[in-house]
Amino acid sequence: MGAEKRRYPREETDIKLSLILEHREVAVNVRNISKGGAFVQVKAEDMNGIMLSDVGRIARLRTEDDHTFTSPRGTILRCVEEGGTKYVALAFTAGAI
């Protein structure tokens, strides 16, 4: 395994949240998170809720009980689909955990 190149270390996790984009809410599982960003897996039932055209948009993470993160907003860096599963990478504007 190579050396970590990210500014902030990532913590592996499996947190169920929603990704809020304008007037859309997309169910996701957070796969890893750090002060600098998060990598989320879009739930199968919401795969069409986020598209490549969303890259560059601001999104907000929200828990089921509407818990607020220190920095609930992030910019979508990329959206990829692998083996029928969609993933989204977010960059936070400030520390989120």
Image (cartoon, rainbow, N blue to C red):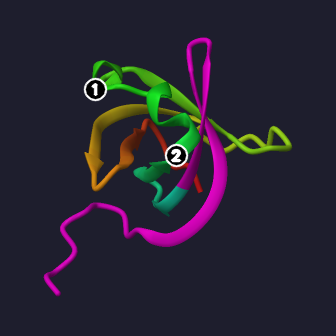
Horizontal side, residue 32 vs residue 18: left or right: left
Q: For the residue marked with disc 2, what is the amino acid? A: Ala
Residue 3: x percent and y percent?
A: 16, 80
Q: Image height check: is 55 above or below 66?
A: above
Q: Nearer the viewer, residue 22 or 86?
A: 86
Q: For the residue marked with disc 1, what is the amino acid? A: Leu
Horizontal side, residue 40 vs residue 67: left or right: left
Residue 8 part of the magenta segment: yes
Residue at 22% across, 74% down = 4
Q: Nearer the viewer, residue 51 or 30?
A: 51
Q: Image height check: is 39 above or below 26?
A: below
Residue at 43% across, 36% down = 93
Q: Of circles 1 and 2, which is in front? A: 2
Residue at 36% across, 63% down = 8
Q: What segment is highlighted magenta in the picture?
A: 1-29
In the picture as drawn, the residue positioned furthest to the top comes out as 23
Q: Quadrant of the N terminus?
A: bottom left
Residue 42: x percent and y percent?
A: 49, 45
Residue 28 part of the magenta segment: yes
Q: Quadrant of the C terminus?
A: bottom right
Circle 1 — which element? helix
In the picture as drawn, the residue positioned furthest to the bottom comes out as 1
Q: Nearer the viewer, residue 5 or 86?
A: 86
Residue 55: x percent and y percent?
A: 30, 26
The residue at which mark 2 appears reads as 44
Residue 76: x percent and y percent?
A: 36, 32
Residue at 50% across, 26% down = 49
In the picture as drawn, the residue positioned furthest to the left comes out as 2
Q: Residues within 10 Å of mark 1 (few under 14, many from 20)?
A: few
Q: Which mark is residue 9?
A: none
Q: Which mark is residue 52?
A: 1
